[in-house]
Amino acid sequence: MRKMLRAAVLLFAAVLAPGGALAASSAVATADVNMRAGPGTGYPAVRVVPAGGRVVTYGCLADYSWCDTGYLGARGWVSAHYLTTIVAGTTVVVGPRVGLPVVSFNTAYWNRYYTSYPWYYRGPAYYAPPPGASVNRNCGLHGCSGTVSGAYGGSAAGTRGCGPRACGGAGTVTGPNGGTVRGARACGPRGCVGGYRVVGPNGGTRGGVGGFPR
């Protein structure tokens, strides 16, 4: 009787535990692969899972493109394309037939696992657009250009090219009401450098050279 009661308690605890054993599964990396802070290559790398590394998979996105994993104390997302597991005695790439839970990525996940990382303060939206926004990127031999369209009608466009001695860039931010800001070089978390020109939605302008706070 005591053994039966103990087994029932352990089962109940496993069901209640977040990401408990009943919801998790084991998978193996087929190559050296980045574990990232979100489900996409735009997110920073948390660490590298080596080929043959065994990870715990807690679930995957609905399309099984990325899976929430754990490896040697780190938590993050790995492309399902690089994960295999055993199903009915056969090694298969992680996909719908594996039967893992469908999970999603959100700010709560970011806040739970990444507060100690130097890029945490930027937030997940810095690395991937929020719902309703879109990103288009085009890269060639000598540089890249891209446009981000926000959910409320604003957009940001920029180009960057590199030559044998240096790199140069230019960007334009357009607000949902039609105002624009154009910079000759680049902007960081604390401000911008280079020449700039601001045009308000009613046609007013402002320009300057040097650094200015955002």
Image: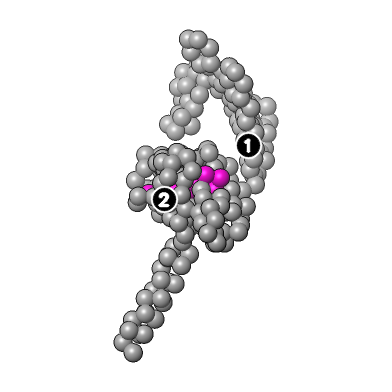
Where is residue 67? Give x, y as percent. Answer: 52, 51
The answer to the question of whether label 1 and label 2 lie on touching residues, with beta carbons closer than 8 A, is no
Q: Quadrant of residue 148?
A: top right
Q: What secondary structure is found at the residue carrying circle 1?
A: strand
Asked if residue 15 is positioned above or below residue 25 in the image, the reply reads: below
Instruction: Residue lying at the far top in this picture: please name it.
Output: 165
Q: At 63% from the left edge and 27% from the top edge, which residue is drawn?
A: 138
The residue indicated by pointer 2 is: 54
Asked if residue 185 is positioned above or below residue 36 in the image, the reply reads: above
**Camera-side residue: 112 or 191?**
112
The kind of secondary structure the magenta stretch mainly shows is: strand
The residue indicated by pointer 1 is: 135
Where is residue 171? Give x, y as percent. Answer: 58, 25
Answer yes or no: is residue 124 visible.
no
Residues in magenta, as a range: 74-82
Pick whichever of labels 1 and 2 is earlier in the sequence. Answer: 2
Q: At 41% from the left edge and 71% from the top edge, which residue is drawn?
A: 14
For label 2, the crowd category at 10 Å Cα-Cα, with few meaning under 14, some 14 to 19 and many 20 or more, is: some
**Camera-side residue: 84 or 123?**
84
The amino acid beneath tag 1 is Val
Asked if residue 139 is positioned above or below residue 58 in the image, the reply reads: above
Q: CA distance from mark 1 to mark 2?
A: 33 Å
For label 1, the crowd category at 10 Å Cα-Cα, with few meaning under 14, some 14 to 19 and many 20 or more, is: some
Where is residue 194? Give x, y as percent. Answer: 50, 18
Instruction: Residue lying at the far bottom in this picture: please name it.
Output: 1
